[in-house]
Image (cartoon, helix red, strand yellow):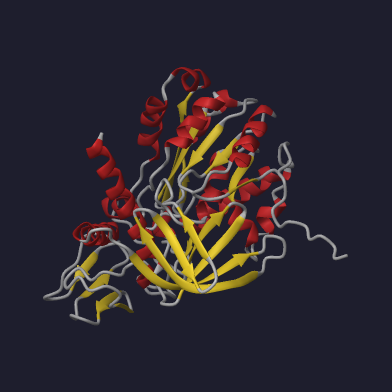
Amino acid sequence: MAKKQKSMVPKPEFRKPPWYMNLLQRALGIYSKINYRAEFSKEQREALKPLKGKPFIALATHSSPMDFALAGHALRPWRGSMVIAVSLFYLSAGGLARGLKNSIPKKQFTKDPVSVRNIKRMIDAGIPVLMFPEAMFTLDGNDSRLSDTHFKLLKWLKVPVVVIRVNGGYCTRPRYFRGFRKGKMVVDTNIALTAEECATLSVKEIRERVMPLFKYSDCNFQQDNNLAFVNKKRSTTDGIIRILFVCPKCAQMHTIIEEWNAVSCTACGNKVVFNEYGKLLPESGSVAFDRLDLWCKYQYNHIKNIALSEENYVYTEEVKLEYFNTRNGENIPVDEGILNISENGFEFIGKEVTKKFPLPNPPCLPMQMSSRIDLFEGDILCKFVFKEKFRPVRAFTTVQALFDIKEEKAKKLQ
């Protein structure tokens, strides 16, 4: 009889991390200060002292991989648990996640009652819990949508809430960029709610208290402070065709190519230079937006207008379906076919397999930006690998547009 394989996702241990985690938090903070000019407020850290000896929830923004180190340092000397995307445990670099014995695995953008119960058990054990409610790195440097589920959780737990906002994290490591850039980051840490306020305020009032401290726009932050973010070995547009897919001049899709510190359109010749200060500079006769996030907003509006112009709009791509074996980290080829995305959700029609998934709420997708999106079917991680490269962000944008169209139609019927 074959030996049963051990899952790559360990069950959390409901105890504080070992004492040396304080040293790691401090070391990561010093590293980020020296190499990336991260700034932390002593006054804000002093304001956290009343939380000593109490469990609390910390909500941190999620603009780059630096967030884990920055949030941990901002909360020092508290040692707590961290909610981590379950997919992180599956990566080859996931050994660190698996080494954090009290981390809480969470399936992204799907109901996961087990993780909710584990968060409650951790709080009941007197251990602070750090969460990244956006659940994925921002695509455009702006805060992502948060579901009311997070604020309902805060009301249910009835513990103090700390909000950690990293300004400049996306500029240090944009979602599309392969590497890090040196510039400046400012970390804001504030107590948003007391335990008593979580118990007495409504879910709507809790959201209204948290969101002003949570919202960020890194493209604005960079331009408003005239900050340069530089990686001497890489172009400012390195990897940017992973995120930009609509030309602002001719509106053709998937015609943008990278040049050194610039992008151009193969259909109309539109050329835009990206400088180290986050400014987009069109060449003579070309069209550009002031900031990257505005270009992404244009892409969203373009897709939404297409969807509105067609009755029962469906976006279709050829894909391969793979299952991910959570016990040995292997991808298992399953089928080939087409993936349809509509207001009704996702529908995979393969040669042998057919699958359906609802639109996620909030409308976000775990993805590998060059090639695939991931969807959970119960405990099964389904990977949809696109035949054409650089389609995941278009799929993500389509999901957002269709979700909003569906919401707008529902409001009109009320």
- Quarter of the view holding residue 278: bottom left
Residue 76 visible in rendering:
yes
Which quadrant of the figure contains the C terminus?
A: top left
Residue 305 appears left or right of 144: left
**Residue 113 screen position, x and y as percent:** 59, 39
Lateral position of residue 283 relative to residue 332, left or right: left
Whole-percent x, y for residue 189 in the image: 47, 36
Residue occupying the far right of the picture: 1
- The residue that appears at 47% across and 55% down in the rendered structure is 357
Image quarter where the N terminus lies is bottom right
User: Who's the residue at 17% across and 73% down the image?
Assistant: 250
Query: Which residue lies at the image location 25% right of the left edge and 44% below the top edge?
Result: 409
User: Residue 131's image quarter?
Assistant: top right
Q: Position of residue 75 (x, y in %)?
A: 56, 38
Residue furthest to the front in view is 352
Q: Residue at x 42, y 46 (%)?
A: 361
For residue 223, above or below residue 323: above
Residue 63 on image: x %, y % = 44, 53
**Foreground pick, 107 / 182:** 107
Q: Which is more toward the observer, 317 or 216?
A: 317
**Depth check: 381 or 102 in front?**
381
Is residue 43 visible in the rendered image? The answer is no
What is the residue that sits farthest to the left in this orientation?
Answer: 285
Counting every numbered tag in the picture gives 0
Q: Quadrant of residue 388?
A: bottom left
